[in-house]
Image: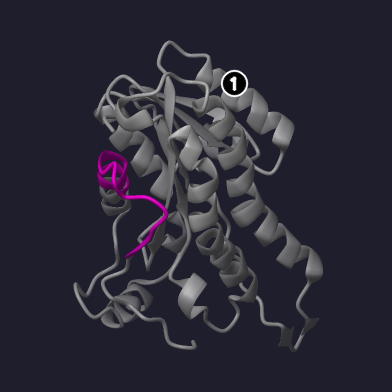
Amino acid sequence: MQVNGVAAIVTGGASGLGGATAAALAAKGASVYAFDLPSAIEGAPKVEGVTYVATDVTDPEQVQVAVDEAAGSASPLRVVVNCAGIGPSARILSRKGPHDLALYRKVVEVNLIGSFNVLTLAAEAIAKTEALEHGARGVVINTASVAAFDGQVGQVAYASSKGGIVGLTLPAARDLASHGIRVLTIAPGIIDTPMLATVSDEFRAALAEGIPFPKRLGRPDEYAALALSLIDQDYLNGEVVRLDGSLRMAPR
């Protein structure tokens, strides 16, 4: 599927993986609607072809309004890339006591339910577009993590939410097959995003040393390039692709 001349939604589109993906799609000729929280949009760079839409992905009413804006543009809505997410760390039992249930619920709500919310409402809009060759109408790419497979100490909430993304990939692809909508997932390893901006160079070096090859942190533009490649490959569907330098996470 070509992205030139289509509308695309990117959640978490103001920075990190989402920011890189929004810019890459716009550079290829897509009209991009970057959903993110108002606080994130305030500091986002101005990118030609990218329209920022203040949206909480966990709020179905806000997402519906934002999807309607993207679907109502002059270009057909055919692409969704879900990058919005949070990753706080907490053990099930620690010196502070048991894992806070509200924190666990929040992580699952943003990472898993938020992705499902956008996928579902956007799929409804994509299904109304004119079919292309072989009945194709669009593609949704969700973001999991290697933590879905190799969750570390303190990642129980994060790993649960990302494991849910992996688990919904195939049934979602099957559900939406009759509408010509593909569903795929990227599971990144350690990517140099704003979430790592505050760590020291020594810590970064230690992280890179644990990656078999190449021994460095991944880049957001590499995620974006993979997303564009998945969009382009019409026969790729219902699959989870790891982007991790063959990293398998240790317990801690």
Q: Quadrant of residue 75?
A: top left
Q: Which residues are magenta?
A: 227-242
* Residue at 61% across, 72% down: 89
Compared with residue 124, is residue 115 higher up or lower down, i.e. above or below?
below
Question: Residue 243 versus residue 48: which sits nearer the camera?
Answer: 243
Mark 1 lies on residue: 68
* Residue at 42% across, 18% down: 130
Q: Quadrant of residue 249?
A: bottom left
Compared with residue 178, is residue 167 higher up or lower down, i.e. above or below?
below
Left or right, 154 with reference to 252? right
Q: Position of residue 207 (x, y in %)?
A: 35, 77
Which residue occupies the extreme left position in the image?
214
Q: Position of residue 50 (x, y in %)?
A: 40, 26
Left or right, 150 with reference to 114? left
Question: Residue 86 versus residue 119: which sits nearer the camera?
Answer: 119
* Residue at 20% across, 76% down: 213
Say whether residue 134 is visible: yes
Compared with residue 150, is residue 120 higher up or lower down, i.e. above or below?
above
Where disc 1 sits, the SS reads helix
Left or right, 183 with reference to 175? left
User: On the rendered image, what quadrant is the N terminus found in?
Assistant: top left
* Residue at 51% across, 22% down: 70
Compared with residue 149, is residue 86 higher up or lower down, i.e. above or below?
above
Judge whether residue 236 is colored magenta. Answer: yes
Q: Quadrant of residue 188?
A: bottom left
Question: Residue 185 versus residue 176: which sits nearer the camera?
Answer: 176
Question: Residue 219 versus residue 6: which sits nearer the camera?
Answer: 6
Q: What amino acid type is highlighted by mark number 1?
A: Asp
Packing grade of label 1 (10 A; few <14, some 14-19, many >=20) is some
